[in-house]
Image (cartoon, rainbow, N blue to C red):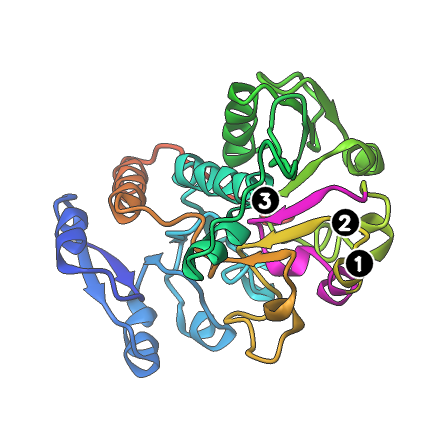
Amino acid sequence: MVKVLVTFPLDERHLSMIREVEGIEVVKATSSREIMKEIENAEILFSTSITEEQFSRAKKLVWIQSPFVGVDSILIDSIRQSEVIVTSSRGIHASQASDHVFALILAFTRKLPELFEDQRKRRWKPRHPFPFEPLDELQGKTLGIVGLGSIGMEIARKGKCFGMQVVGVKRNKLRIENVDVVYGPDELEKVLKISDFLILCVPLTPETEKMIGEDELRKMKKGAYLINIARGSVVDERALIRVLKEGWIAGAALDVTETEPLPENSELWTLKNVIITPHVAGSTPAYWDRAVRIFTENLRRFLKGEPLMNVVDKSRGY
């Protein structure tokens, strides 16, 4: 029997789905003490993270499956240097994360925070036709997507439904459906300059950490919006606060921040041109069904000696 160790609070229904795979023994351990005890004989780990101390005890470990798309909390130095296979749950976020992006975009263009505040105060404030204080529309706007994986491609598809011009940044500059122009990473500046909405959906790697700093932010249009559903560390938060306070860009919507939860004393809470959501872009009632289905399919492949889905390139970080 192959021992599978689950180290996060997965519910019994989903544990039962995993146990339906023949030829495995499933053990759940969530406390540090339990994990240190059980990981010694585990060959497969279904986990959101691992520590150096835990890995030092994992003498039989062959493969780690993450229930998340991002694997930065698994790719510790010793894992990167080992022969342990790491796989992700890539592909389960595209529908709901792209929905979340457009909820944020529309919140800005249709001035929903202001309108909700008016509603809270029971204030009917005419905007059309007199006085003429129009809301905006998406048709004809330029949508810039940094990271054209499954989420980025779905954002592009939905952008086209709104009549937007879509440009993107991707390591490989092959033609992508629904993207008018694909730029390489060295051409990011071109995307910054033309985007009305700049969407960040890249994995956190050494190359993407702080990729959007003060220089990049000041190359954006003054009326542009930044939307980050990637990782908080992709953006230099202090620089972002400066340009937002100066009005250099119109606003930012952040589903992720450098420190999570966002500290109560962060200036981001106080800025009227910022929308904050608590790392929920990927949230959906179907999340764990999708993640466990990927894992069980990979378990069957592993036991048959077949190639696994969503294998992470540990040198690139995704």
Label 2: few (<14), some (14–19) or many (≥20) C-alpha neighbours in 10 Å? many
Kind of element beneath mark 2: loop
Instruction: Classify residue 310 as left or right of residue 193.
Output: left
Measured in 3D between alpha carbons, the distance from the residue under mark 3 to the one under mark 1, in whole angstroms, is 17 Å
What are the residue bounds of the magenta stretch?
Answer: 222-241
Q: Find residue 217 and report its horizontal and vertical position in percent.
A: 80, 50
Measured in 3D between alpha carbons, the distance from the residue under mark 1 to the one under mark 2, in whole angstroms, is 7 Å
Q: Nearer the viewer, residue 242 or 17?
A: 242
> Which residue is under mark 3?
108
Q: Which residue does the image show at 53% across and 31% down from the upper left? A: 155
Q: What amino acid is found at the position of numbered circle 1 in the picture?
A: Val
Q: Find residue 43 and report its horizontal and vertical position in percent.
A: 33, 58
Q: Which quarter shows the N terminus?
A: bottom left
Measured in 3D between alpha carbons, the distance from the residue under mark 3 to the one under mark 2, in whole angstroms, is 12 Å
Determine contact: label 1, label 2, CB under 8 Å: yes
Q: Which residue does the image show at 42% across and 36% down from the upper left? A: 91
Does residue 15 sit above or below 152 in this rendering?
A: below
Mark 3 or mark 1: which comes first in sequence?
Answer: 3
> Which residue is under mark 2?
249
